[in-house]
Image (spheres, rainbow, N blue to C red):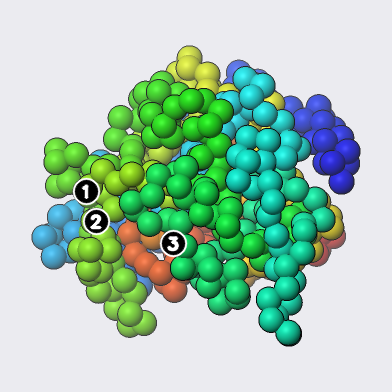
Amino acid sequence: MKALFVLGLAFLISACQPESPSTAASQSQARLVDKTHIDEVLQSLVHEQGLVGVSALIYEQGEEAYFGAFGFADREAQRAMERNTLVRLYSMTKPITGVALMILYEEGRFQLDDPLSKYLPEYADMQAFVTQEDGPNFIEPSYPIKVYDILRHTAGFVSAADDSVPGKLYAQLDPFNHENTLAEMSQKLAQVPLLHQPGKQWVYGPGTDVQARLVEVLSGQKFENFLLERIFLPLKMYETGHYLGSNQRDRFAALYQWTGSSMERASDEIAYSDYYQVWPLRRGGTGLVSTLDDYMRFARMLTNGGELDGVRILKPETIKLMATNALPDTVTDLSWLPSKGRVGFGINFAVRHSPPASAEEASGAVGEFFWDGFANTLFWVDPKNQITAVLFTQYIPFGPVELHKPFRDAVYYRDAEARAPKAENR
């Protein structure tokens, strides 16, 4: 498996090098973004579908092509959703963590197929849960967790949502208590048996938080300091971080909860406690706040092959590696990943490998990579059409009000190819 993985990645990298910005800009390409149509769609989501507030920013062919904001960031205070509104990214933190770790990859600090225990020895003696017929049964994993397993959600980690024996132990140990450091989190997580064998299934879990701890060990810095020094300051993402200062809080969006018929304001404890206090735990899988423009600077860096405004964060080949499906054909259990469309998974991104299979699937282009967040935020990078999009809103749980599909369909309104299924690829 190791040899096939490495050889496959090497072939993809050599065969699919991204165009340089100058080459892309020289090509004659019709513009797709229709501002009037996107305005109509987003307005209808607020006025007819019950969204409290929504905003979006789109770049096309290297230029800003769309900005729109509708409704409220805070309905009760009658504070409008604006361009500089700060929102909770939740899992849109994960791509940033992936970039942080890949900076260290470029520096030669680790290899993708290294055993995780080489750097985090607490994972050396993991056990895998097998059955519960005659009581818990645990066996040695078929191979040690590799670094690339924590990058693509194939490590076998359980999450608190699971009701298995490992899931109950996870809940008991509470690795993600705010009072834990990343080092303490990792030590506790390593005590929980794996839910399945490494490399066998795609299961969304805490691997990105282990990435954050790996960043600390490999760099010798606290995770939040590494993000600040190596990503946020170089990219001028001055509004992005785990903690909101007093001068930012009047721009922080309220959080809403869908009740089945309306959006109700979430409790202040849920909405603000994570961000108004400096907790020991600074997670890699969630926890960042940002603005549209800040996150767009991060996304444009990805679009440009790792560089923005003369500042290089990663090499083009590293971005291509991150945006290439890294799931082996042997991983057939993909949990809920297929709900994102016909996609695989690279390094902290979903990667579209085929056109939409039906009109019910959201529009998108082959080769795009993207991710979203629990409060229904979304971003994607579409190299084919040179489109970079960021969508912000703030309601939980994920998905009960359809938002991502109508927005994607609106962005690709002028592109029938991105919206219509291809019969030969069904």
* Farthest residue, direction top: 310
**Residue linked to disc 1:** 276
Q: Is residue 422 visible?
A: no
Residue 224 left/right relative to 84? right
Dot 2 amino acid type: Ser
The picture places residue 175, in percent across and down from the top left corner, at 46, 56
Dot 1 amino acid type: Tyr
Marks 3 and 1, how far apart at CA: 21 Å
The residue drawn where x is 73% and y is 68% is 138
Q: Are marks 2 and 1 in contact (CB under 8 Å)?
A: yes
Per the image, label 3 sits on a secondary structure element best described as loop
Packing grade of label 1 (10 A; few <14, some 14-19, many >=20) is: some
**Residue linked to disc 3:** 174
Packing grade of label 3 (10 A; few <14, some 14-19, many >=20) is: some
The residue drawn where x is 23% and y is 63% is 269
Query: Residue 80 falls in which quadrant of the image?
Result: bottom left
Q: Is residue 175 above or below residue 387?
A: below
